[in-house]
Amino acid sequence: MSKRQDRQNDQNLKGDSNQKDQERITELEQRLSDLENQLKRAVADYRNLEQRIAQGRSELTNYVGAELIKRLLPVLDHLEQVLAGIGEEEKKSGWVKGVELAVKEFQDILRREGLDQIVTEGQFNPSIHEAVDIRAGEDNKILEVARKGYKLNEKVVRPAQVVVGKSDLKSQNQEIKEEK
């Protein structure tokens, strides 16, 4: 072989080698890009999972807190009934003042946890009130509160039990009396 042919063969080999190297580089760059995209998706999935877990913990904490408060409401009812049934003479004694302070502190703690008493003045609202009786009076007006209701963070945990007025009841009662 001549020198010319050797040079030609060397250039061909170099050209083939350069082309193969270029293909390999392109292939590796594509693989790197794919792996980077997979990593970005995996990191985004992980962040979303962390957020869902945090939200789930928060919901669980709120649920447990709401259940505890629901179980404490009858205790509050009983304490308020005790205070309402105390006579004027007994109100001056030290133990009554102590119970009043304890009830007030208990109510403040519940309020700070997000518990609010449902308003029971005015019109009956079936989404926050429960009618336990109907009496003669202005239509759909709350006449009396049988049991206080409460909302926890704007969600009803116990509807207020109320007596609701109905104007037709007056005329029905008069008709019954007249028939007798």
Image (spheres, helix red, strand yellow):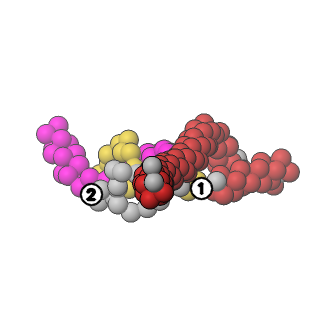
Three-letter residue code for mark 2: Asp
Which residue is painted at 26% across and 52% down in the image?
A: 166
Q: Is 140 part of what is drawn in magenta?
A: no
Foreground residue among 36 and 97: 36
Which residue is painted at 48% across and 57% down in the image?
A: 3
Q: Position of residue 134 (x, y in %)?
A: 32, 46
Q: Position of residue 30 (x, y in %)?
A: 44, 53
1 and 2 marks in contact (CB < 8 Å): no
Q: Counting other residues with Cα less than 10 Å from the Cα at mark 2, is it few (<14), some (14-19), or many (20 or more)?
A: some
Instruction: Give the residue at the far front of this rendering.
Output: 2
Which residue has dot 1 on it?
114
Q: Is 112 above or below relative to 132? A: below
Instruction: Give the residue at the far right of this rendering.
Output: 94
Which residue is painted at 66% across and 58% down in the image?
A: 112
Q: CA distance from mark 1 to mark 2?
A: 32 Å
Three-letter residue code for mark 1: Gly
Q: Earlier in the sequence, mark 1 or mark 2?
A: 1
The label nearer to you, 1 versus 2, is 1
Q: Is 161 part of what is drawn in magenta?
A: yes
Helix or strand or loop: what does disc 1 sit on?
Answer: loop
Q: Position of residue 77 (x, y in %)?
A: 61, 43
- Residue 82: image quadrant is top right
Foreground residue among 76 and 114: 114
Q: Position of residue 6 (x, y in %)?
A: 47, 53
Please tell me the numbered disc located at residue 139.
Answer: 2
Q: Is residue 81 visible?
A: no
Q: Is residue 135 visible?
A: yes
Q: Which residues make up the magenta segment?
A: 155-180
Please tell me the numbered disc located at residue 73.
Answer: none
Foreground residue among 141 and 52: 52
